[in-house]
Image: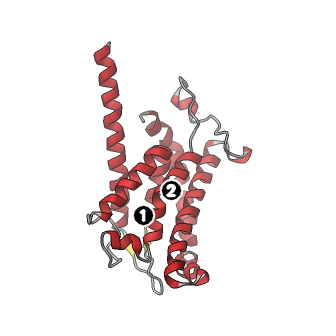
Amino acid sequence: MEQVVVGSRSSVVGFRIAALVGGALIVAGAAQISVPLPGTPVPMTLQPMAVLLVGGLLGARFGALSMILYLAMGAAGLPVFTPTVPLFGIARLLGPTGGYLLAYPIAAYATGWFSDPARKRGENPEAAAMSVNPGLAPGVRDPWGRIAFGVLVGLVLIHLGGLAQLAIITGSISGAARLATWPFLLGDVLKLVILVPVLTRLTPTIRARL
């Protein structure tokens, strides 16, 4: 019996490590898909979508840890950041797009927390996915609404991080919004449309193993 318990714990730990590394690699892969936009130093990229996906799938704690690992990889000089921005390592975190990157752990945590099915100890994972997060308003307690709200909060936090750092660099909040927020609003709507059904389907299965 003891061997079974130890083996089970080892399996869980192994899956958690794989999930943390896998989440960081998903964001790193998404960063390679990048399109420069005229008039702004911020490119169009799939990174934010990947961050929200990882946060939603892994939950608050593991989603945030995975993004911290991602930032550590980039700060160490590994080619995990968007290639269209000509800054490397720690310099990228201090540059015009660094605010977005630094917001990733917070955004992943928030997305994971708000989309948390609030599993109770001993509750079946499938049933837990339908349970209520007491921190949410009644209108967002169903799985779709809960996850949509989590994704929306994550998007807002990423934008706030990017906007804050760019405003410091440019000295203008309105100018920073013109460069870093308005061009990406349509893409944010598309992220919501894509992520909500994906997370609704996959989140219970992934989190049950964490």
Tag 1 near tag 2, CB within 8 Å: no
Residue that appears at 34% across and 37% down: 15
Regarding mark 2 in the picture, which secondary structure is present there?
Answer: helix
Return the residue found at the far top: 1
Q: Does 58 sit above or below residue 166?
A: above
Query: Could you say where residue 9 lies in the image, as x and y percent from the top left?
Result: 34, 27
Question: Which numbered marker is on residue 155?
Answer: none
Q: Which residue is mark 1?
A: 47
Q: Residue furthest bottom?
A: 39
Q: Which quarter shows the N terminus?
A: top left
Q: Secondary structure at mark 1?
A: helix
Q: Position of residue 16 (x, y in %)?
A: 36, 39
Q: Where, quadrant-wise, is the C terminus in this rendering?
A: top left
Who's the residue at 36% across and 47% down the image?
Answer: 20
Say which amino acid is labelled 1.
Gln
The answer for how far apart the CA atoms under marks 1 and 2 are is 14 Å
Is 84 drawn above or below residue 70 in the view shown?
A: below
Task: Please state the horizontal and vertical placement of residue 94, each as a whole percent of the image.
Answer: 40, 73
Q: Image check: 43 left or right of 78?
A: right
Q: Is residue 204 left or right of residue 152?
A: left
> Residue extending furthest right?
138
| Count of numbered circles in the view | 2
- Residue 9 in the image: above or below residue 108: above
Q: Mark 1 vs mark 2: which is more N-terminal?
A: 1
- Who is closer to the viewer here, 168 or 59? 168
Q: Which mark is residue 106?
A: 2
Nearer-the-camera pick, 9 or 27: 9
Residue 57 pos. (x, y %): 46, 46
Q: Which of pointers 1 and 2 indicates the residue nearer the eye?
A: 2
> What's under tag 2, amino acid-wise?
Ile
